[in-house]
Image (tube, grey):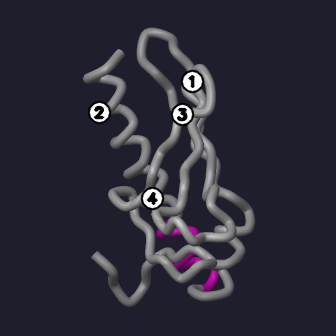
Amino acid sequence: MVTGKSLSCICGTYVDASSLVIERIGEGEYKIVCPSPKCPLHELGFVKVTHHSKPKFEVKISRMFKDWNILLLGRESCDRLVRDLLKQLSLKLRKFYETCC
């Protein structure tokens, strides 16, 4: 759902946890990809998974993606929306790991 204050990629695509594509790039490493095939940025972030008793997720958002959204939304709104996105991505990844691993 797109609201008045939503994160967007530099290509103009609005993004949320449900629209982002997560691609495996190595053992326990994933990249977060813009859903638009025409996006010049393509990669919006990375995820590193460490396994202990429970998997831990280290999610990093691309600096360019975050800076773009700071310009559009302001720092406070962007920081809040990025925090929410990171929480949603962590939940999505946790559910994935519970079913597969």
Q: Going 43% across and 84% down the picture, which residue do you hit?
A: 5
Measured as percent of width and height from the top left, residue 6 is found at 43, 79
What residue did someone put label 3 on? 24
Of pointers 1 and 2, the one earlier in the residue sequence: 1
Q: Is residue 48 left or right of residue 62?
A: left
* Closer to the camera in the image, 38 or 100: 38
Query: Tag 2, which secondary structure?
Result: helix
Checking the image for residue 28, the label placed there is 1
Q: Distance between the residues labelled 3 and 1?
A: 8 Å
User: Which region shows up in magenta?
Assistant: 74-81
Helix or strand or loop: what does disc 4 sit on?
Answer: helix
Q: Name above or below for residue 67 compared with residue 30.
A: below
* Residue toward you, 4 or 28: 28
Mark 4 vs mark 3, CA separation in Å: 19 Å
Residue type for callout 3 = Arg
Determine which residue is flagged by label 2.
95
User: What residue sits right under mark 4 in the picture?
Assistant: 85
Q: Is mark 3 on a helix, strand or loop?
A: strand
Q: Do the residues labelled 3 and 1 touch (CB within 8 Å)?
A: no
